[in-house]
Amino acid sequence: MAKLKLGALADDRPVKLTIELPAAVHRDLAAYAAALGHETGQPVNDPAKLIAPMLARFIASDRAFAKIRNVKKRLPANAASAAPPATTEPD
């Protein structure tokens, strides 16, 4: 059996969001929850609990986003929130 990208779910204080998913995505999420429960030996009773770790994994693996975040971290606090300098066109 292939190793799934998610591991056991961490117990963390959540922030509540309400979202709508296409039916096909919900079916896949439920199937993933069943597969993860089988692989880890810990049943996943609520497939919605997978959404946060899946999003976290997706964001962590996005190299372009990581570059943007790293650039913003290196900028001084006032420069990160400032608008870029205006450019003028030659007459």
Image (cartoon, grey):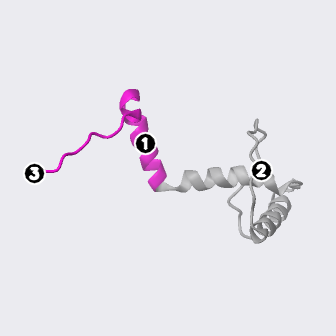
Q: Position of residue 18 (x, y in %)?
A: 76, 49
Residue under label 1:
70
Determine which residue is flagged by label 3.
Answer: 91
Secondary structure at numbered mark 1: helix
Start and end of the magenta stretch? Answer: 64-91
Q: Quickly name the residue at label 2.
A: 8
Residue 82 in which image quadrant: top left
Q: Nearer the viewer, mark 2 or mark 1?
A: 1
Amino acid type, residue under disc 2 in the picture: Ala
Q: Nearer the viewer, residue 18 or 1?
A: 18
Q: Amino acid at mark 1?
A: Asn
Residue at left offset 75%, top offset 59%: 20
Q: Nearer the viewer, residue 35 or 79?
A: 79
Mark 3 Cα within 10 Å, few/some/many (few <14, many 20+)?
few
- Mark 2 vs mark 1, CA separation in Å: 28 Å
* Residue sitting at the far left: 91
> Left of 68 or right of it: where is 91?
left
Among numbered discs 2 and 1, the one appearing first in the sequence:
2
First in residue order: circle 3 vs circle 1: 1
| SS state under label 2 | loop
Residue 25 among those drawn in magenta: no
Task: Please check the rendered image and state whether residue 66 is part of the magenta-colored stretch, yes or no.
Answer: yes
User: Which residue: 87% across, 56% down?
Assistant: 41
